[in-house]
């Protein structure tokens, strides 16, 4: 099994995969925040299945501005919420520069022909990453996508989400996609959207009754 973990943080998703899948061959963990990167390197130094890459992921290759979340100390491992998106509501004016890579570039460079799981927690860059995935047909070699949506924290991201939703329908891959519903817990996107639709209907019905 080969897994890509974008936004590895402290390794929670990686640990869960190691627990669930005894046949893991390789997990590629992307983590751009230096303290977290160093923590992961130390944590998995004796596990050859885990490779830690000190880079963010988006739809470009190169160097990018990485904005700091409020109350984040740059030198402390465990901090989360830093982002490539200046419009995120909980960031400050402080930033650093980080390496950024397209996942399609990484896959091509490594010669990967099959990805079992691709997890994306990119603090607002998830739809940029999916743009690259669609453009370069990464969905054809990937069995499952797990991702977190950050529309509630970034103004204007809902348009990207709607375009993403249309695209997965056109490509017929909606049943490959799982969305995070709470920390490291995911539900099939189709099922979560149906649950939300029913909740909306129930709220409208309750309001009408009242």
Image (spheres, helix red, strand yellow):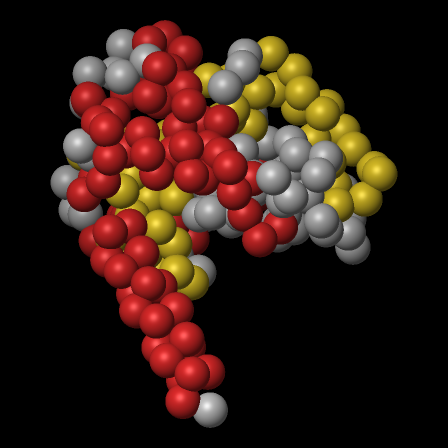
Seen from the viewer's position, the closer of residues 95 and 1 is: 95
Say whether residue 198 is left or right of residue 102: left
Residue that sits furthest to the right in the current view = 93
Label total for image: 0
**Residue depicted at x 35% and y 50%:** 179
- Residue 83 seen in render: yes
Q: Nearer the viewer, residue 141 or 39?
A: 141
* Residue projecting furthest to the front: 208
What residue is shown at x 71% (from left), y 39% (from top)? 87
Q: Is residue 155 left or right of residue 134?
A: right
Residue 141 position, x and y percent, is 19, 22
Reply above or below: 183 against 113: below
87 lies left or right of 105: right
Front in this rendered view, residue 150 or 73:
150
Whole-percent x, y for residue 111 in the image: 27, 10
Which residue is rendered at x = 56% and y = 39% of the image? 157
Is residue 113 shown above or below 198? above
Q: Is residue 144 above or below residue 15?
A: above
Q: In x, y percent, where is residue 2?
A: 24, 31
Q: Is residue 142 visible?
A: no
Residue shown at 71% from the left, 49% from the top? 89
Residue 114 at x, y = what percent?
A: 19, 22
**Which quadrant holds residue 68?**
top right
* Residue 195 in which image quadrant: bottom left
């Amino acid at each position: 099994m080969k897994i890509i973990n974008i936004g590895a943080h402290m390794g929670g998703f990686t640990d869960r995969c190691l627990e669930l899948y005894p046949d893991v061959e390789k997990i590629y963990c992307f983590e751009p925040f230096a303290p977290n990167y160093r923590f992961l390197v130390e944590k998995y130094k004796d596990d050859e299945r885990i490779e830690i890459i000190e880079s963010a992921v988006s739809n470009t290759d190169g160097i990018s501005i990485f904005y700091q979340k409020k109350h984040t100390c740059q030198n402390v491992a465990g901090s989360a919420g830093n982002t490539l998106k200046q419009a995120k509501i909980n960031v400050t004016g402080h930033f650093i520069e980080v390496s950024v890579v397209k996942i399609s570039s990484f896959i091509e460079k490594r010669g990967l022909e099959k990805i079992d799981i691709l997890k994306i927690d990119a603090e607002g860059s998830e739809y940029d990453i999916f743009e690259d995935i669609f453009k370069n047909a990464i969905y054809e070699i990937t069995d499952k996508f797990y991702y977190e949506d950050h529309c509630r924290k970034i103004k204007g991201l809902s348009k990207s989400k709607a375009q993403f939703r249309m695209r997965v329908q056109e490509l017929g891959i909606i049943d490959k996609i799982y969305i995070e519903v709470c920390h490291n817990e995911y539900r099939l996107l189709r099922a979560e959207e149906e649950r939300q639709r029913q909740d909306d209907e129930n709220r409208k019905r309750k309001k009408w009754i009242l």
